[in-house]
Image (cartoon, helix red, strand yellow):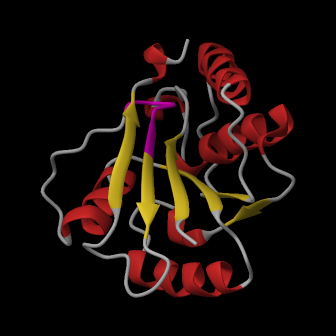
Amino acid sequence: MTTKLYLIRHGIAADPLEYESDRDRPLTAVGQQKTAKVAKRLQELDLHFDLILTSPLVRARQTAEILYHTNLSSHLEESNQLAPGGNIHTWINWLEAWQNSGGSQLALVGHQPDLGNWAEILVWGNVKAAIILKKAGIIGLNLPSSGSPIGNSELFWLTAPKLLL
């Protein structure tokens, strides 16, 4: 069975200059509202995830919680691999175990440029710095049911949040 992977960038976050640590930056009120509208639209499209896996950074966690509370998934977990600079190869090892447990629809909530780079690695096998994911934007990939997903995945969805609002 093919795995559907949705890469979702966190919503609009507070100015980095307002926080001592980048990890602590929350979503702004506008970021929360737009992310909630995107989540509601995904629900209207009958999109649901077996699992939402999120970066531990506050803005990503808040985005994931909005998706979760819109009933897009019954499970929400954090992964340090989704923090900025996370290792896609370590995540792929986790993915293989998750796929073997029967999962087929997965959402990753994280950061740009990492999510765009991961999509490129999964589709083309290397980073081309060509895919830009807007805040609360979504990339959809079909991952192969066997073998490495690197260079063997298929892009089926790339949308900015304004197209979902």
Q: Quadrant of residue 144?
A: bottom left
Q: In this image, 61 relative to 158: left or right?
A: right
Picture residue at 66% right of the left edge, 86% below the top? 100
Nearest to the observer: residue 113 or residue 123: 123
| 74 in the magenta segment | no
Nearest to the observer: residue 128 or residue 14: 128
Residue 111, horizontal then vertical, whole percent: 45, 48
**The residue stretch that appears in magenta:** 134-139
Picture residue at 54% right of the left edge, 29% below the top? 13
Compared with residue 165, is residue 147 higher up or lower down, i.e. above or below? below
- In what quadrant of the picture does the N terminus appear? bottom right
**Magenta stretch mostly in which secondary structure?**
loop
Picture residue at 24% right of the left edge, 44% below the top? 131
Count all numbered tags in the image, as a single digit: 0
Q: Quadrant of residue 33?
A: top right
Compared with residue 102, is residue 63 higher up or lower down, i.e. above or below? above
Residue 53, horizontal then vertical, whole percent: 66, 60
User: Given the current orientation, which residue lies at the most extreme front position?
Assistant: 1
